[in-house]
Amino acid sequence: MAAAIPTLVQVATAACDKGDPGYCAPSTDNFLYTSFASFHIAGIDFEITKLTMLLYLGIVIVAGVFLWCTRSSKIVPSKKQWLAEEAYGFVRNGVAGDVIGEANAARFGPYLASVFFFVLILNLFEIIPVAQVPVTGRIAYPAFLAAISWIMFNYLGIRQHGAKKYFKTMLFPPGVPWPIYILLTPIEFFSTLVVRPFTLAVRLFANMFAGHLLLLVFTTGAIYLFNVGGVSYVFGTVSGLMTILITFFELLVDLLQAYIFVILTAIYVQGALAEEH
């Protein structure tokens, strides 16, 4: 069972060891959570933690907001209906339409919009009081989403072109002198089938994990310095101001990483569907 995550004050005032009364910087240990419940299915252990609850909450928020905004849809939209339509239109037109093509915008718009807003709310939990942790800061969640994208674009490519043509075009691009295939084919195989899902997951995870750890360092640092007192109040104030600045910066990162994740997914889908593939 994971150790319970301490409060910010406990983190800030905790010593790295019993003989060191100084500040102990946050580490990966501060991202471990106590499980609320555990159970076993087919010999596999499952645990419900704070991150799991935030994941479920994210699903409820995204689905609930859009259902609430569109439950009484009219030709002349209300403000909330207009807001939901504009939010969906941003992904449908700006991502699905521009990247995959208008012919496929309606086909893939709902999925891409769902992924965008789901990843966004999981990211935003980082700066929301009480939650204060990005769910995507744990590699398992971005990895699962990346796996879905990987399965989807490969399935669509095989369905569109047939397995033989899909993999042949991927591994042996036309118009290339045959000796080049000795070098190009392994690169294309590794790039498309291994690197894409890996980088898609790690890019999101690494940005959210590093940003949250940085935010935690300045937050706990300010608390520790204020507890020390004296001239440390000056440095504590600077650390506190940096916390505010990084919070706004992380808001931008949260939005950007959700957008990057969904637009890369759209690019992979477009490449799988393209005739030249």
Image (cartoon, rainbow, N blue to C red):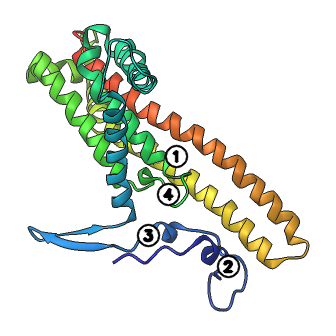
From this viewpoint, is residue 167 visible?
A: no
Say which residue appears at 58% left-offset and 51% top-offset.
211
From this viewpoint, is residue 249 visible?
A: yes
Mark 3 and mark 1 lie on one chain; the one further toward the N terminus is 3
Left or right: residue 224 versus residue 90 is right
Amino acid under disc 1: Asn
Mark 1 and mark 4 lie on one chain; the one further toward the N terminus is 4
* Mark 2, residue position: 13
Is mark 4 in CB contact (under 8 Å) with mark 2? no
* Mark 4, residue position: 133
Left or right: residue 139 versus residue 6 is left
Mark 3 and mark 2 lie on one chain; the one further toward the N terminus is 2
Amino acid under disc 4: Val
Amino acid under disc 2: Thr
- 10 Å crowding of disc 1: few (<14), some (14-19), many (20+): some
Say which residue appears at 26% left-offset and 22% top-offset.
108
Left or right: residue 229 versus residue 195 is right
Secondary element under disc 2, as helix, strand or loop, is helix
The Cα–Cα distance between marks 4 and 2, rounded to whole angstroms, is: 20 Å
Pinpoint residue 15: horizontal percent, then vertical percent: 65, 83
- 10 Å crowding of disc 2: few (<14), some (14-19), many (20+): many
* Mark 3, residue position: 32
Pinpoint residue 144: horizontal percent, then vertical percent: 28, 47
Q: Nearer the viewer, residue 55 or 143?
A: 55
Q: Quadrant of residue 251?
A: top right
